[in-house]
Image (cartoon, rainbow, N blue to C red):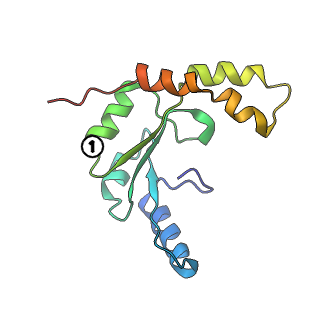
Amino acid sequence: PNTRPPTISVSALEDKLRRAAEVSVVNYGFFIGATKDNLEELANAEQACGIKIYMGSSTGDLLLSEPEELERVIRGANKIVAVHAEDEARLRERQKLYDHDIAPAHHTLIRDVETALTAARDRSVELSG
């Protein structure tokens, strides 16, 4: 979903599927991206193979980092939910370390293992009951 334009609505998903159908020679499916404001779109995106949550802000409006936001999307999901776990606070701190020299090689240094582990550990959603 982190494309231009982002795939965060049913119409954007349908457009992407239409374009893929014109050129693809293999099976394919697309996720719809979760935002703070598109719960209805997520519920109506029947053709999506799943819902993608981005916990880090590297993807524009595709940012859900608060536990309440995550829980709202996950509880309302009617399909697979994939989570790109990045702790937003740590991500911003680490980006400052490389602001002077942004290079592709820094991607994994900024988004290190601890950035993912912190997001998964500290923002876990309890879905029992």
Q: Residues within 10 Å of mark 1 (few under 14, many from 20)?
A: few
Residue 79 place in picture, x, y as percent: 30, 52
| Residue 26 position (above or below residue 12) | below
Q: Say left or right for 14 vs 41.
A: right
Instruction: Identify the image quadrant of residue 97.
Output: top right
Say what amino acid the circle numbered 1 marks.
Gly
Q: Say left or right for 81 vs 101.
A: left
Residue 104 place in picture, x, y as percent: 77, 39
Question: Looking at this view, is 7 or 24 the one in front?
Answer: 24
Q: Tell how many labels.
A: 1
Residue 65 place in picture, x, y as percent: 47, 28
Residue 16 place in picture, x, y as percent: 52, 67
Residue at the spot 37% in from the left edge and 33% down from the top edge: 70
Residue at the spot 53% in from the left edge and 25% down from the top edge: 87
Residue located beneath label 1 in the image: 76
Q: Say left or right for 2 vs 128.
A: right
Residue at the spot 51% in from the left edge and 56% down from the top edge: 7
Question: Looking at this view, is 123 or 38 the one in front?
Answer: 123
| Residue 41 position (above or below residue 93) | below
Q: Secondary structure at mark 1?
A: helix
Instruction: Identify the image quadrant of residue 46.
Output: bottom left
Question: Looking at this view, is 56 or 104 the one in front?
Answer: 104
Q: Quadrant of the C terminus?
A: top left
| Residue 1 position (above or below residue 26) | above
